[in-house]
Image (tube, grey):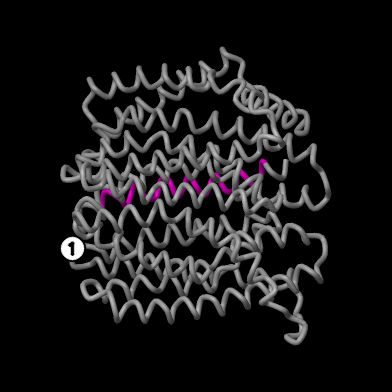
Amino acid sequence: MKVIKNYLYNASYQVLALLAPLITVPYVGRVLGVHGVGVNAYTNSWVTFFLLLGQMGISLYGNREVAYHRDDKEARSKIFWEIEGLQSLTIIFAYIVFIIFLFIFSHGYRGYFLIQSILIIAGGMDVSWYFMGLEDFKKIVVRNMIIKVSSIALIFIFVRTPDDLGKYIFLLGMSQVVGNLTLWPYLKGSVKKVKISLLRPFKHFYPSLLLFIPTISTQVYLVVNRIMLRMADTEAVGQFDYADKITKIILAVVTATGSVMLPHIANKFSNGDVRGIRKSLYNSFDFVTALSMPMMFGLAAVATKFAPWFLGAEFGPTARIMMIESPVILFIAWSNVTGTQYLMPVNRVKEYTASVTIGAIVNVIVNLFLIEAFGANGAAVSTLISEFLVAALQIYFIRNTIRRRQLFAVTWKYLLSGLVMFIVVYRMNEIMQMNFANLTLQVIVGMMIYVLGIIMLKTPVVDQARDIISSRIKKDN
C-alpha cells in the first residue's frame, strides 16, 4: 500500500503539473508569441546542459544510495552530507564554465541566458533526492504544489507583453530556488550532524559520473532538437517546444511510477528480494501500458483542432508534430519501467547508459537529415525513432531476467481498446467545433470506451484495481 500511496501522491502532483500548463501555456503563447517562446526554449536548452553538468547524475545516485541505507541513520546522514557537498562543488564548477561560455559564445541573448542561470543555482539547493530515497513523497508533493500554484499566479500578474520574457524566465527560475529551499527544514531530525573530517565526498564522484552519462544523453532529445531547429528557424523551435511540452506533460502522469519505484526496487535489491523485484517489474509494466495507451491515442485523436484552439492560430503546425510524437508516450513509459525502475536500482548502470547513449547518438544523426528537409516534423520523427530504440534495447538487455512473452502477453488488449477509442474520438473531433465543453465530452467518451474495452477483455490492471478496492473496503469495515 505504501507504493500505491506514494504513486498517488506523485501522480496527484503530476495532475497539477498537467493542469498548470493548461492555464499558463495558451496565455504565455499568446503574450510572448512564437518568437518569445522560441527564445525561452533555446536559452533554456543551453542552460539545461550546464545544470546537468552541475548535478552530474547526483540526484539519481543519491536517491538510490539513500534507499540502500534507509534503515541506518548514521550511514544515511554521512551519505547525505557527502553527496550534497559533492553537488555543491560540481554546481560551482558548472556555473564557472557557464560564465565562460556566456562571454565567448552567446552574443544574441546574453541577458536571457543570465536570468536562465538561476536554474543552475537552484540545482545546488535541491535535496529532493534524499526524501525520494526514503520514499517520503508527501513532503516533496506538498512543496511542489504550493510553488506551482504560486508561480502560476505570479505569471498572470507580471507577464503581460512580449517585453516581459525576462520576467517570465525569472519567475520560473526563482520558483525553483524557493521550492528547493523549502525542503531543507525537513532535514532536521532525519539527518544527523557529521564531522567534516569524516566526510569523503569524492568517493561518490565516479559512481555518480556513471549516472551522469545516461542523464545527459536523455536530455539530448530535449535539448539538441531545439538547438538544431534554432539553426533553421526560431519559430520552428517554438512550434516543436510546445508540442513536446504537451506530450511530456501527459507522459508525466505515467512516469510518476519511476520516481516511486526506483527507491522501492533499490531497497528490495539491497535485501536480496529477487522474486519481489520481478513481480514488481511485471505489474509496473502492465500498469504503465494500460495508462499510456489511451493517452497516446487520445492526444493523436484531438491534436488537429486542439493545438490552434489551445495555443493560438500561429501554433497550427504544432498539431502535426503532436500526432507524430504521441507514440513517444508509450515508448518512454516502457523504458521508464525497464530503465529507471529496474536497471538503475539493481546497479546495471552500464546497460542503462548504453541504451540512452545509443538513442542520443541516433537522435543527432537522424536530425541532421530530417530537420533540414522537414523542420519541426523531422525533429519529432527523430525523437520517436530514438525513444523506440531506447525501449527496445532495454527490453533486450533484461531478456534473461524476464519473460518477454509474459511482458507483452496482454499488450494487444490495451492496443485494441485504444484503437477503438481513437477511431471514435478522432471522428468526433472532425465533426465537432473545438471548445472546452466539446473537448471534455471527447475525453469522457474516450475514457468510457477504453475502460469498457479493458474490462471486457479482462486485463490484469482491472484485476489489480478490483483487488485494491476490495482490500480497502475490508480494511474500512
Q: Observer-nearest residue: 358 or 288?
A: 358
Q: Which residues are magenta?
A: 4-27
> Split into 4 quadrants, where in the image is the C terminus?
top right
Q: Residue at x 65, y 65 (%)?
A: 207
Residue marked by disc 1: 162
Residue 244 visible in the snapshot = yes
> Left or right: where does residue 246 sit relative to residue 267?
left
Q: Residue at x 53, y 74 (%)?
A: 124
Q: Is residue 26 magenta?
A: yes
Residue 100 in the image, given as x and y percentages of width and height? 36, 81
> Left or right: where does residue 227 sit relative to residue 162?
right
> Left or right: where does residue 59 sit relative to residue 15?
right
Amino acid type of the residue tagged 1 in the rendering = Pro
Q: Residue at x 36, y 66 (%)?
A: 46
Q: From what the image shows, is residue 206 above or below residue 14?
A: below
Q: From what the image shows, is residue 41 above or below residue 381?
A: below
Q: Observer-nearest residue: 412 or 220?
A: 220
Residue 91 in the image, given as x and y percentages of width and height? 51, 76
Residue 21 in the image, given as x and y percentages of width and height? 36, 49
Residue 31 visible in the snapshot = no
Return the residue found at the far left.
314
Return the residue found at the far bottom.
197
